[in-house]
Amino acid sequence: MEKSNKKNYSACALLAFCLSLSAALWANEEFQARLLTYAGPQAGMAEKLIISIESYSTPDEVYQLREIFEKNGYDPFMAAFFRINKGNIRPVGGRGVKLNIHVAHSIQKDNGRQIFLFTQRQSWDTGARQRIDRRFNFMVIELNVNKKGKGNGKIYDQASIRFSPSGTLEMEAFNSPPQQLFGVSLLK
């Protein structure tokens, strides 16, 4: 029995090391994308975004957030969530605000990667008014890129999230249709 526990512990330690190593290998990435605006005087124009990812979240970081939520509640969880900085999303040459990324996941797929970025819910346009539903306090950005770093994505302005058993955050639901990102490409 003792030998089996050591093997399980070693396998878990190796898995944790590999996950953190793979997250570290993909750190300091920068993508550009275009967001089609839907409202205002510039409706239908594409806004260029730069998405800078300094590092990806480890399962341990997400487990710590989950523990804070389960033991201390929503407000301490949100305070801890806001303290995490995994990068930012910023508009180039137009109106808009810089958003800080608080949780970032990169998931390998057969044809490339799927990247999920989590931040607080807010409007891109500083002058826009949004209808607020307190059940959807997050913004989720999804990037789908091929092995050459090119692809598309979506922005879910108002989303709810949940913790997965594998140590990631997932989007649980969204309240408004996603905005489309196109021309996503890896810069560095």
Image (tube, rainbow, N blue to C red):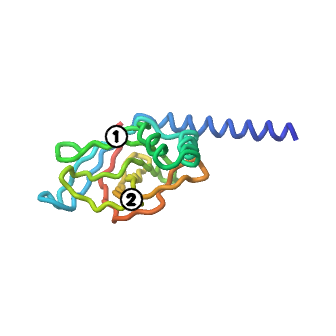
Question: In the picture shown, does residue 33 fall above or below 11?
Answer: below
Question: In the picture shown, does residue 57 fall above or below 37?
Answer: above
Q: Amino acid at mark 1?
A: Asn
Camera-near label (2 vs 1) is 2
Q: Quadrant of the N terminus?
A: top right
- Residue nearest the viewer, comparing 71 with 37: 71
Give the residue pinned by disc 2.
Answer: 134
Describe the element under mark 2 as helix, strand or loop: loop
Crowd class of label 1 (few under 14; some 14 to 19; many from 20; radius 10 Å): some
Identify which residue is drawn at 83% across, 41% down. Answer: 4
Q: Earlier in the sequence, mark 2 or mark 1?
A: 1
The location of residue 36, given as percent across then percent down, is: 24, 57
Crowd class of label 2 (few under 14; some 14 to 19; many from 20; radius 10 Å): few
The answer to whether residue 186 is left or right of residue 2 is: left
Q: Quadrant of the C terminus?
A: top left
The location of residue 82, given as percent across then percent down, is: 41, 41
Q: Quadrant of residue 52?
A: top left
Identify which residue is drawn at 40% across, 63% down. Answer: 174
Q: Amino acid at mark 2?
A: Arg
Identify which residue is drawn at 78% across, 38% down. Answer: 7
The answer to whether residue 66 is left or right of residue 102 is: right
Describe the element under mark 1 as helix, strand or loop: strand
The location of residue 76, given as percent across then percent down, is: 48, 43
Q: Which label sits on residue 88? A: 1
How many callouts does the rendering have? Answer: 2
